[in-house]
Image: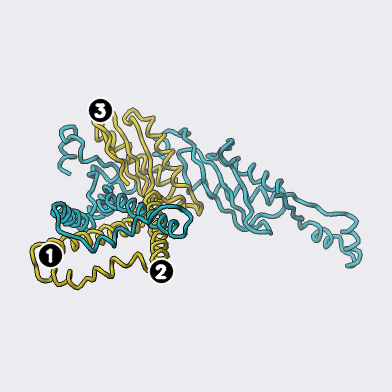
């Protein structure tokens, strides 16, 4: 949708020209007004964004074109800008640069800058624009010498899927099947489908339940499965990887003899 | 998977486990003549149970229970499919960045290293902290020192692209040439 906004130049010029209120009104009416289409505003912002090093234009049939601009309010005082950035990116430099570029461009071209510019990095290029050495030079290691506490490592360690989560999936599928049976029986009761109700058999067999040969394995099976589920419900998740450094983790199943002595010790 | 889903899973597994264990022990006690179990069995009126399907409210209750079971099971199954990944995080400088896109860029970048054969990104929230995890297969000749340096350099780039609170972990799942199958992905 295209909307328009009027630039505030008419009152300013009228004041500088002087004269009575009637004259000013007549002057403004005869002189016309300047209308800025939102498309123009968007183009200016896109142009400003692309002048910042580290940003890039993205066009695609299936994906959104970037940079993309959205005005968050009717007065266009808040602007949301979605950008695509090159990798590696320095957000602490890039975001303020984009904001400044947009402010300056709108102030220069339209005479008013937005009050707020929100910058969202929604795409990051797969191609590296700077060598890792150059990037590391600009971002020296600050905390590499500080050993991370063992507790913090444990806290964020990658872990296996919980046994309870694995067990719950077949349980849920069984519950789902039971629900479908119940709904099917109700449909039969309403006469929408011909047939007999299957779940009625369950309460009716209570009358002649007897201890038969199958009751032993069923009872033992229920006890064993119940115990397994109870253990799965309370057992903590196991760690899947062991830390070598803060950032590097080896899977526990990787052969120890292929790792260094220091790795194995940890 | 979200932590709350894991809690629900544990509750469901614990509840079903308790029911199965209780039922099994009760049946066993009844068979062995244990007094509590036999007394409980005698208190149950089988006539009332067998007449339940003839009650006028039975079809409505069965239907309502079926709908509740279907909706509840589907809700929990869908929760299993949804990951705990976070979409955007605040950056230094007051902007936001799509964490998944950063993960994709890091994976593409790591894949170009001769040390890495394959990299697969994922984003999770562990104890409230967003973390980018990179499950990788490494070259057989890759040394731990080289991998550590690569991981450390990449972490610096991730921190610069997002913020220092975002974690980064390179998870070495297999060494190509070992003939070892890559293990199941970590949540």
- The residue tagged 1 is B30
Mark 1 or mark 2, whichever is nearer to me: 2
Mark 3 or mark 1, whichever is nearer to me: 1
Q: Position of residue A221 (x, y in %)?
A: 17, 53
Q: Position of residue A179 (x, y in %)?
A: 38, 56
Q: Position of residue B5 (x, y in %)?
A: 34, 56
- The residue tagged 3 is B140
Chain (yellow): B
Image-quadrant location for residue B19: bottom left
Number of the label disc, if any, that sits on residue A32: none
Q: Position of residue B154 (x, y in %)?
A: 37, 40
Identify the element where label 2 is drawn. loop
Residue B59, relative to residue A58: is it above or below?
below
Gap between marks 1 and 2 measured at Cα: 33 Å
Q: Chain of mark 2?
A: B
Say few, some or many: other residues with alpha carbon within 10 Å of mark 1 (under 14 / 14 to 19 / 20 or more): some
Indicate left or right for A5 with A159 as reference. Answer: right
Q: Are marks 1 and 2 on the same chain?
A: yes
Image-quadrant location for residue A208: bottom left
């Amino acid at each position: 949708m295209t909307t328009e906004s009027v630039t505030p130049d008419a009152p300013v010029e009228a004041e500088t020209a002087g004269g009575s209120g009637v004259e000013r009104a007549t002057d403004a009416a005869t002189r016309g007004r300047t209308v800025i289409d939102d498309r123009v505003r968007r183009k200016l912002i896109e142009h400003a964004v692309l002048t910042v090093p580290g940003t890039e234009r993205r066009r695609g049939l299936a994906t959104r074109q970037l940079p993309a601009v959205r005005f968050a309010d009717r007065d266009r005082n808040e602007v949301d800008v979605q950008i695509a950035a090159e990798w590696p990116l320095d957000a602490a430099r890039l975001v303020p640069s984009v904001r400044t570029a947009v402010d300056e461009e709108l102030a220069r071209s339209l005479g008013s800058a937005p009050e707020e510019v929100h910058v969202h990095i929604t795409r990051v290029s797969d191609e590296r624009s700077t060598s890792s050495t150059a990037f590391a030079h600009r971002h020296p290691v600050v905390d590499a010498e500080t050993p991370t506490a063992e507790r913090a490592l444990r806290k964020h360690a990658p872990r296996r899927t919980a046994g309870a989560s694995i067990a719950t999936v077949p349980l849920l599928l069984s519950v789902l099947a039971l629900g479908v049976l119940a709904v099917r029986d109700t449909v039969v009761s309403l006469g929408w489908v011909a047939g007999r109700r299957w779940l009625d058999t369950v309460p009716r067999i209570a009358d002649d339940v007897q201890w038969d040969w199958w009751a032993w394995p069923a009872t033992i099976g229920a006890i064993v499965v119940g115990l397994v589920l109870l253990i799965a419900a309370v057992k903590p998740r196991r760690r899947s990887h062991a830390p070598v450094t803060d950032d590097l983790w080896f899977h526990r199943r990787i052969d120890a003899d292929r790792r260094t002595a220091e790795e194995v010790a940890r | 998977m979200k932590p709350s889903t894991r809690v629900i899973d544990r509750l469901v597994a614990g509840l079903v486990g308790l029911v199965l264990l209780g039922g099994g022990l009760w049946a066993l006690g009844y068979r062995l003549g244990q007094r509590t179990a036999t007394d409980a069995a005698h208190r149950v009126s089988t006539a009332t149970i067998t007449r339940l399907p003839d009650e006028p409210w039975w079809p409505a209750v069965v239907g309502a229970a079926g709908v509740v079971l279907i909706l509840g099971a589907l809700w929990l199954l869908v929760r299993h499919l949804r990951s705990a990944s976070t979409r955007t995080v605040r950056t230094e400088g007051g902007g936001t960045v799509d964490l998944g896109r950063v993960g994709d860029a890091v994976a593409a970048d790591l894949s170009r290293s001769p040390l890495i054969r394959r990299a697969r990104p994922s984003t999770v929230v562990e104890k409230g902290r967003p973390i980018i995890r990179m499950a990788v297969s490494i070259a057989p000749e890759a040394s731990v020192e080289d991998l550590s340096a690569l991981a450390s350099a990449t972490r610096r780039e991730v921190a610069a692209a997002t913020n220092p609170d975002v974690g980064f972990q390179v998870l070495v799942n297999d060494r190509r040439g070992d003939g070892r199958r890559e293990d199941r992905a970590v949540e």
